[in-house]
Amino acid sequence: MLVRRRVDHDLPGSVRALREVHDVDGYPARWPTDPAAWLTPSGTVACWVAEVAGVVVGHACLVGDVVDDVLSRLTGVPAGGLGAVSRLYVAPRGRGEGLGAGLLAAVTACAADRGLQVVLEVVEGSGAVRLYERLGWRLVDRRSADWTVPSGARPSIRVYVPPPPG
């Protein structure tokens, strides 16, 4: 098992793992037209992959310069001081090995190095909620998503911040 920075040749494996996650968990809610491009959202600072036996089974990105007045107020972090965990997933064949925690640790360490307070959003009722709460991430907000699922509904989102250092 290994968590490391993503390089360009990791994208096909990252897309295959994302497809597995989509087929099993419905994440992302809508399959992207260009999944490789979707894995690098606007504002991306860095991305990581998780591997098992040389096969990519997980992925995460840090997006910088998140501007969200509500989160700035809730966290006490001024605009521009927030970063976000994005495109985090672990394929079913890689679960239970600590890879999700490893990806989160990589993102939060990179954010800290850049002076960013990291936040993450997750759909209410998602299995990932258990991971974040088990790792001590703290719920700071609930809101409606700014995107829709295929039915047209806007899911409820939970917003978390990591536990304090130490």
Image (cartoon, rainbow, N blue to C red):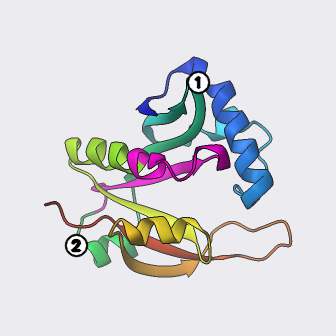
Q: Is residue 14 left or right of residue 16?
A: left
Image coordinates of residue 16 in percent, x first then y, are 72, 35
Q: Nearer the viewer, residue 143 or 97?
A: 97
Q: Nearer the viewer, mark 1 or mark 2?
A: 1
Image coordinates of residue 96 in percent, x first then y, are 52, 53
Image quadrant assignment for residue 72: bottom left
Q: Residue furthest top?
A: 9
Q: Of helix, strand and loop, which one carries label 2?
A: loop
Residue at (51%, 71%) from the top-left corner? 129
> Which mark is on residue 95?
none
In the rendered structure, which segment of residues is drawn in magenta? 79-103
Image coordinates of residue 153 in percent, x first then y, are 78, 77
Indicate which disc, 1 or 2, sits on the residue closer to the N terminus: 1
Image quadrant assignment for residue 71: bottom left
Tell me, yes or no, whether the highlighted magenta stretch contains residue 56: no
Q: Amino acid at mark 1?
A: Asp
Image coordinates of residue 45 in percent, x first then y, are 40, 37
Q: Of helix, strand and loop, which one carries label 1?
A: helix
Q: Amino acid at mark 2?
A: Gly
| Mark 1 closeness class: few <14, some 14–19, many ≥20 residues within 10 Å | some
Q: Where does label 1 land, which residue?
A: 10
- Quadrant in which the C terminus appears: bottom left
Separation of marks 1 and 2 at Cα, in angstroms: 36 Å
Q: Where does label 2 land, which residue?
A: 76
Kindly indicate whether the residue at mark 2 contacts the one at mark 1 (C-beta within 8 angstroms).
Answer: no
Q: Tell me if I can see residue 69 in this picture.
A: no
Q: Nearer the viewer, residue 99 or 62?
A: 99
| Mark 2 closeness class: few <14, some 14–19, many ≥20 residues within 10 Å | few
Residue at (50%, 21%) from the top-left corner? 7
